[in-house]
Image: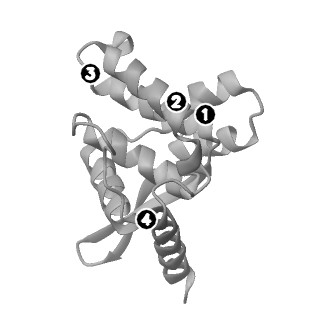
């Protein structure tokens, strides 16, 4: 039986953009525990959720912010037991390009929307991030906030790697 970790490995070696989008669809957060982890990660990075928009599908905005700040998609592939009754999500970070991050954002909105694949909000927000997201992707959008968020993420990664 294939696991999410197998899909992560396939995604990392795949060169076809179309196949990567299919695999990316399998890697998006699925359960409430995964979404809660994404929300916590977004808070650690200092994101504001839906910048300049209403708070509809805020989880999709948090995921998109995390992808933009880290240039990765965090994928929960299991849990690790830290102690008596304490489970911590085991997370892999899959490197993304900007187009894939934007596609994942729209796909999450489509999945949450009652209109599904035909969601006009998903199409509109996807268009906005494609047209206006470049400076946020390169870390110059939102000025100091983007730099502070990236520095915070680097600090978190260093803490996790420290013995």
Q: Regarding mark 2 in the picture, which secondary structure is present there?
A: helix
Residue contact between numbered discs 4 and 1, judged by CB atoms under 8 Å = no
Q: Regarding mark 3 in the picture, which secondary structure is present there?
A: loop
Residue contact between numbered discs 1 and 2, judged by CB atoms under 8 Å = yes
| Distance between the alpha carbons at the discs numbered 2 and 3 | 15 Å
* Residue occupying the far bottom of the picture: 163
Q: Give the mark toward the camera: 4 or 1.
A: 4
Q: Give the mark toward the camera: 4 or 3.
A: 4
Q: Give the mark toward the camera: 4 or 2.
A: 4
Q: Give the mark toward the camera: 3 or 1.
A: 1
Mark 2 burial class by Cα count in 10 Å: few <14, some 14-19, many 20+: some
| Distance between the alpha carbons at the discs numbered 4 and 3 | 30 Å
Q: Regarding mark 4 in the picture, which secondary structure is present there?
A: helix
Q: Which residue is mark 3?
A: 113
Q: Residue at 74% of width from left, 35% of height from top?
A: 14
Question: Reading the chain from its start, which is encountered first: label 2 or label 3?
Answer: 2
Q: Which residue is mark 2?
A: 103
Q: Which residue is mark 4?
A: 145
Residue contact between numbered discs 4 and 3, judged by CB atoms under 8 Å = no
Question: Reading the chain from its start, which is encountered first: label 4 or label 1?
Answer: 1
| Mark number displayed over residue 99 | 1
Please say if 36 is above or below 161. Answer: above
| Distance between the alpha carbons at the discs numbered 1 and 2 | 6 Å
- Residue 161 lies in quadrant: bottom right
Question: Reading the chain from its start, which is encountered first: label 3 or label 1?
Answer: 1
Q: Residue at 67% of width from left, 24% of height from top?
A: 19
Residue 100 placed where, x, y %? 59, 35
Q: Residue at 38% of width from left, 31% of height from top?
A: 108
């Amino acid at each position: 039986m294939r696991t999410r970790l197998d899909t992560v490995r396939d995604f990392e070696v795949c060169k076809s953009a179309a196949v990567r989008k299919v695999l990316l669809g399998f890697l998006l957060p699925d359960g409430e525990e995964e979404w809660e982890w994404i929300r916590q990660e977004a808070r650690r990075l200092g994101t504001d959720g839906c910048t300049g928009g209403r708070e509809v599908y805020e989880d999709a905005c948090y995921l998109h912010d995390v992808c933009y700040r880290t240039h990765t998609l965090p994928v929960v592939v299991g849990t690790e037991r830290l102690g008596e009754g304490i489970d911590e999500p085991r997370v892999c970070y899959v490197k993304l390009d900007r187009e894939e991050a934007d596609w994942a954002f729209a796909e999450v909105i489509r999945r949450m929307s009652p209109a599904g694949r035909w969601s006009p909000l998903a199409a509109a927000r996807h268009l906005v991030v494609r047209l206006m997201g470049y400076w946020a992707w390169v870390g110059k959008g939102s000025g100091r906030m983007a730099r502070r968020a990236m520095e915070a993420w680097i600090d978190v990664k260093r803490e996790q790697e420290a013995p």
